[in-house]
Amino acid sequence: MSTLVGTGKLVRLILRRDRVLLPLWILTFGLLMVTVVASFSELFPTAADRQQYADASAADAGFVTLYGQLHGSSLGELSVWRGGFYPVLIGLIALLTVVRHTRTEEETGRRELLGATVVGRHAGLAAALAATLVANLVLAAVVAAAMAGQGLPVAGSLAFGLELAAAGWVFAAVGAVAAQLTSGAGGARGIAVAVLGGAWLLRVVGDVSGLSGGGLSWVSWLSPIGWVHRIDPYGGERWWVLGLVAALTAVLAGAAVALEARRDVGAGLLPQRPGPATAAAGLRSPLALAWRLHRGLLAAWTAGFAVVGVVLGGAGSSVADMVAGNQSLEEVFTRMGGRTGIVDAYLASVMAILALMAAGYAIQATLRLRAEETNGRAEPVLAGAVGRLRWAASHLVFSVLGSAAALVAAGLTTGLTYGLSAGDPGHQVSRVLGAAVVQLPAVWVLAAVAVALVGLLPRYAAVAWGVLAACVLVALIGASLQLDQWVMDLSPFSHVPRLPGGSASATPLLALAAVAAGLGAAGLAGLRRRNIPAL
Amino acid sequence: MTETIRTEALVKTFGRTRALDGLDLVVRAGEVHGFLGPNGAGKTTAIRVLLGLLHADSGTATLLGGDPWRDATELHRRLAYVPGDVTLWPSLSGGEVIDLLGRLRGGLDAGRRAELLDRFDLDPRKKGRAYSKGNRQKVALVAALASDVELLLLDEPTSGLDPLMEDVFRQVIREERRRGRTVLLSSHILAEVEALCDRVTIIRDGRAVESGTLAELRHLTRVSIQAELAGPATGLAELPGVHGLDARDHSVRFDVDTEALDAALRQLAGAGVRGLVSQPPTLEELFLRHYDRTGGDRARDAEVTR
């Protein structure tokens, strides 16, 4: 076991470094569940109220895409269902945590500093995994206590806590494997997030297909996210699913250790190839440099969005089948606008989700600017005959046009796949593409928030992620919490017209575009005046 | 124009830290100017102000006849810069970075580039991630030296180079001077500055404490004398400017201020000189005179890394 010497000390180092972040996200999820339970019991005080809401919601494909299937109408089941996207978020946090404490440490050379001390070969990986796994158990305890404290059954509360932890476990291990594959942390994060996205998509395909009793509902079982939903808290808990999760986690962790044993510190398994000895003739401007730095990320996001569009567009036909084949819910469906109305509502939800994800890309691309600065790579560029605005613009092109490219790709594929199944691709493509494009001003507002932070408060540039997280929460639970309208209005995404199907007016879009332009201009003005690097 | 760089009373603060505290610096056209000071003295801050990356709080700076903040982009066509801590883009090869940086400042001499790659023994095909610290430094050096510019701003450019490469670096800088380029060479390596520089500015706590040619600066310091004598030396102890006198029967050892050197030697000659070793002041002693006295200040300096 000499390869694990020092693991305990490294765990303490991780806890020291994450002493704010770790309790913060754990408590956030605990608090969120408290508010979700409280608001459901306030909004739907009687069993009949809840039954009515559940009947309508269970058939809403947009809801199923976001939250998963709803099996019952008890307070516990409704609350857990509303927290149905949390496993994805927790999986994301878990994999980012593991990559940050393994591959990022190696890439920055800090691992080397530790590796020369009495620390075993696998201690770093073991410590990152141990800290993340235990943190997820703490999360399970906090969430279980929060739910049980609201008077919900203890078994179900524990099951839901463990459902969230289970997602964290699997994707912590996925992060551990990904961290062995590439020599850069960015690449490792990309691989792990792609796996998470794939797992979510499989869950969505299976669940939406299951709505109409479709033949693809088994697909959910291919996805760890699907698994943890099947634990079914408060609805006859399937505890054995946790065994499945533990086994997969163990297999993945074992694979990560085996991979780590086969490689050198600092190296990935995917080999580094030598590059050209001279630059291509085109590599002569900040924009050409930015293209080299962004193209991989842009291609990955655009391709990912196109795939998500194919899958969710394809699921749209299941939604239509569901309406056609279900007599008992006819009244509910009619109230929701009939066949067209329901499919449109579903597609609008899909576009709203994609817009939030596209904002993630826009922020990521914008913060490259700040990363270039803090890594010292902006300095040699700015010491050339390159103005600051030109340098900034070279990166911001990608936040603005890159997010547009990704959304357009998703709009095209969603419209095309749904249109093919519905028999009028031309009409559907233009409708869905329009629904994708109207999201852009809101996406750009988030990018502009990041620009403003980079320009005016560079030390707090990462707060842009917090702003996105707040927008996601408003979108996920704002309506069910009955937040005041002005709180909802703080999120730019609340102002986007619900298309297709809804009525679109240009005013909110122009207002959003103006806000984006104003924030962006303020940020650039700040960037022109301030010190570089601002540390 | 005979002055390539002039700063007067330059002040730059970061929060409560005063990184530059009234810096005066003059670099004449065509000279290699040593910018000497320990870590945290303000060298990098001064260079970043000259590059227009940092905005000085007060004082004036002129670079190549322009304002480094206002005219940054235009001025940067005429200078090349090597940062003290070179980081490269992980996905770009060294050769690509050299070409890119050269093109960003307006052109690269392909022949010179090939020659420098050869002399610095640098493989341009490696990706940024794969280079060692010294090799990253070489990438930035080749990019700067192969550019056709008037002024080179080099911030501790040899910090990662091995002695062989340091020798190549010195040769190359001498060639640059012969071509008439101006070089501002920030360093804490005294031997390097002594070997290369025409004039030196010593900076401490963000302020220039000495500036001049090496000869001028030496003039301000003491020569150390060690002599074997025929008889006992007399009168040395009474001479002003003699320090640390250690007299035995027939040998003496002392340090003497430059202006008292003549008188001291007369005294020695009176006693009959059998052997004499005289050591001119090294830059090191000069340096120590400014830094060694105040241990407290140095400890504070070490915390101010900008």
Image (cartoon, rainbow, N blue to C red):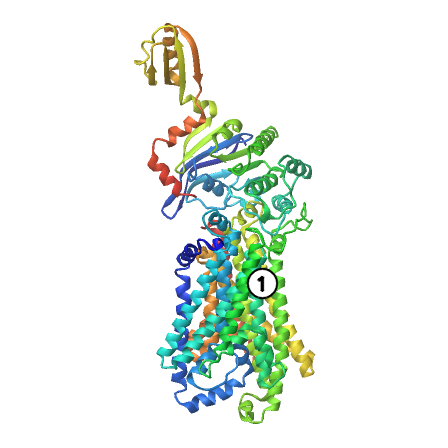
In the image, residue B186 above or below residue A19: above
Q: Nearer the viewer, residue A93 or A431?
A: A93
Question: Left of A102 or right of it: where is A273?
Answer: right
* Amino acid marked by disc 1: Ile
Give the x, y percent position of residue A78. 45, 82
Extreme front residue here? Answer: A1
Give the x, y percent position of residue B235. 31, 10
The residue located at (59%, 88%) in the rendering is A323
Disc 1 crowd rating (10 Å Cα; few below 14, some 14-19, many 20+) is many
- Pointer 1: what residue? A191
Give the x, y percent position of residue A9. 41, 54
In the image, residue B155 above or below residue A301: above
In the image, residue B201 above or below residue B259: below
Q: Nearer the viewer, residue B128 or A484?
A: B128
Classify residue A504 by image quadrant.
Answer: bottom right
Q: Which secondary structure, mark 1?
A: helix
